[in-house]
Image (cartoon, rainbow, N blue to C red):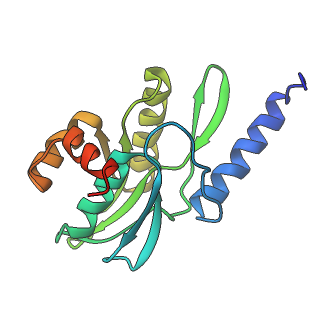
Amino acid sequence: FGKRHSPETRRRISETRSKLISDGKIELAPSHYGLKGYFESKKMNEVFRHDSFIELLRMRMLDVNSSVLTWTKRHSIRISYEIDGSQKKYVPDFLILRISGEMILEEVKGYENERKKQAKFEALKEYCKENGLLCSIVTYSDMDKLSKEFFGKNISMLRKEYKNGK
């Protein structure tokens, strides 16, 4: 009731929470933002939580893409970034292994505060560079183009169908 955590406590909470999420030990609770749910991957024989509709579409694409050997959301990777003088951690969306042997760390981003999004993107690029991974950032407009290629429909049409149970 009106009390605030110290910056150190907030940092520890963020670190603990991101670790549990990246290890697949906790799932984020549903909220009124976006369409959250679960996707059963045939390729991976696992169920993964999606935190947005475009993330669900990306999972469906990865699952049928013949150049993708494996993909996961449970990769234990947490990336530190700084915003407004605070250290934060976030968990990238996917770790993808292509048949060619390339390892890709991918972030799918719809709507988010532009400064926060840029801070995460810069941290992701640096992490990938330091760890010998390819970096992929897929934006909403990228997903709209990919959706037209993969499904023959744009995101708005697919979202409407999804909401109507199709």
Residue 79 in picture, x, y percent from top left: 55, 46
Count of number-bearing discs: 0
Q: Name the quadrant containing residue 41.
A: bottom left
Say which residue appears at 89% left-offset and 22% top-offset: 2
Tell me if residue 78 comes above or below residue 72 in the rendering.
above
110 in relation to 164, above or below? above
From the image, which quarter does the C terminus lie in? bottom left
Q: Quarter of the image containing the N terminus?
A: top right
Image coordinates for residue 23, horizontal then vertical, percent: 60, 64
Closest to the observer, 108 or 56:
56
> Which residue corresponds to the image point at 80% horizontal and 29% vertical from the top-left?
7
Residue at 44% from the left image edge and 75% from the top image edge: 46
Position of residue 4 measured from the top left corner of the image (x, y, whole percent): 86, 25
Question: Residue 100: x and y, percent?
Answer: 20, 71
Q: Nearer the viewer, residue 115 or 36?
A: 36
Seen from the viewer's position, the closer of residues 153 and 132 is: 153
- Place residue 50 in its image quadrant: bottom left
In the picture as drawn, the residue positioned furthest to the front comes out as 164
**Considering depth in this image, is 28 or 100 the residue closer to the camera?**
28
Q: Residue furthest bottom?
A: 45
